[in-house]
Image (spheres, rainbow, N blue to C red):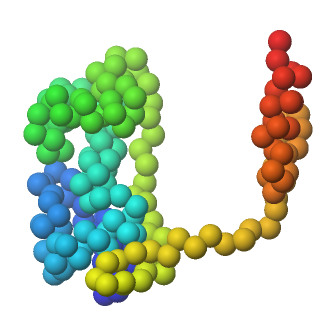
Amino acid sequence: MDQYEVIESSLIYIENNLDQSLTLESVANTFNMSKYYFHRLFSAMMGCSLNNYILSRRLNASLPFIQTDHLPLTDIAYMLNFGTQSSFNRAFKRQYGIAPSSLRVKNLNILQSPVPSVVKRPIKNINGDIVTDFTLTELKSIRLSGIAFEVDLATDDYKTKIRSHSNKTSC
């Protein structure tokens, strides 16, 4: 299994085991890897730590329970292995900007995000450190058309054009 397949498999494993106690060591052991190597590999490929990723996926998994089921928030917190309802509430509010109880009361709808895909970037191992190659590539200039005007994103003055247009149309 190459590095990309390991991370893709780990994302599926995490998604299927959100109700379990997931630690860096337990996930790395599942794929027969050192926790230090797995941590560097996961962080380099996903752009966040494993713990932050697991937290965001648990919060994502809580959305349908909050929005459709009438389970108490405490049960949802324990079901998704948050430990306490207060830690669940804090994390939820930090991620979505609204408390889970408010989401339920206001009957708002936040869509679940799918499991992210692994972007296959070149990975270099320099002195034992895993780093990804974030080399920027030159893209063709494109034009984005809006309802009222066009802006050429390739030029440096697009911000000025947007501001001047908004000043014309403001009441």
What's the residue at 14%, 45% (across, down)?
Answer: 81
Looking at this view, name the residue that lies furthest to the top.
171
What's the residue at 18%, 44% (across, down)?
Answer: 80
Which residue is nearer to you in this view: 162 or 74?
A: 162
What's the residue at 81%, 44% (across, down)?
Answer: 158
What's the residue at 88%, 34% (across, down)?
Answer: 148
Q: Is 47 above or below relative to 9?
A: above
Which residue is nearer to you in this view: 41 or 22?
A: 41
Name the quadrant containing residue 25.
bottom left
Left or right: residue 148 compared with residue 92: right
Report if residue 61 is visible in the image.
no
- Could you tell me residue 28's position as x and y percent? 18, 72
Q: Is 96 above or below relative to 120?
A: above
Name the quadrant containing residue 47.
bottom left
- Could you tell me residue 131's position as x and y percent? 40, 75
Looking at this view, name the residue that lies furthest to the bottom.
1
- Could you tell me residue 44's position as x and y percent? 38, 69
Report if residue 109 is visible in the image.
yes
